[in-house]
Image (cartoon, helix red, strand yellow):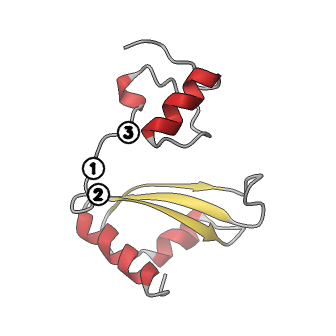
């Protein structure tokens, strides 16, 4: 696979047409850095936005306690586009847990 610098115009075009965030900074020429097509029936990952500005790992994990085992959690602080909120990527081991949190969020319970 060819080296595609993540910060130049070619990298920006690849990201745009691949559905990858323009903020993603990894080398797109490395296969492991590219997203895989995962359908909604097996997806275990959630991208959660509009979290309180100061969101802690312990506080966030307390909110998803007893939903299912968590594989990973990464909290992003405020950004230039969203200076008053945080966001997080939450990955469960099981799809059912992700689906439960997604359903709760849709009902305004998360």
**In this orientation, does residue 11 appear?**
yes
Residue 87 or residue 40, whichever sits in front: 40
Residue 35 shows which numbered tag? 3
Residue 43 shows which numbered tag? 2
Categorize mark 3 by other alpha carbons within 10 Å: few (<14), some (14-19), many (20+).
few
> How much space separates mark 3 and mark 1, taking CA atoms?
9 Å
Are circles 1 and 2 on residues that touch, CB within 8 Å? yes
Percent of width and height locating residue 90:
44, 59
- SS class of the residue under badge 3? loop
Q: Is residue 94 left or right of residue 45?
A: left
> How much space separates mark 1 and mark 2, taking CA atoms?
6 Å
From the viewer's perspective, is residue 2 above or below residue 19?
above
Query: Residue 12 sits in which quadrant?
Result: top right
> How much space separates mark 2 and mark 3, taking CA atoms?
12 Å
Q: Is residue 40 left or right of residue 106?
A: left
Are circles 3 and 1 on residues that touch, CB within 8 Å? no
Question: Residue visible at 25% across and 55% down?
Answer: 39
From the viewer's perspective, is residue 108 above or below residue 44?
below
Question: Residue visible at 43% across and 81% down?
Answer: 106
In the picture of the structure, the residue carrying the numbered disc 1 is 38
Q: Quadrant of the N terminus?
A: top left
| Sequence order check, earlier mark of 2 and 3 | 3
């Amino acid at each position: 696979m060819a080296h595609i610098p993540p910060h130049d115009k070619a990298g920006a075009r690849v990201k745009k047409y691949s559905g990858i965030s323009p903020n993603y900074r990894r080398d797109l020429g490395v296969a492991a850095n590219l997203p895989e097509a995962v359908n909604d029936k097996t997806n275990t990952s959630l991208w959660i936005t509009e979290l309180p500005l100061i969101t802690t790992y312990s506080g966030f994990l307390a909110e998803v306690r007893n939903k299912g085992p968590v594989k990973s959690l990464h909290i992003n602080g405020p950004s230039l586009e969203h200076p008053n909120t945080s966001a997080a990527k939450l990955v469960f081991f099981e799809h059912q847990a992700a689906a439960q949190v997604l359903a709760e969020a849709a009902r305004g319970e998360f």
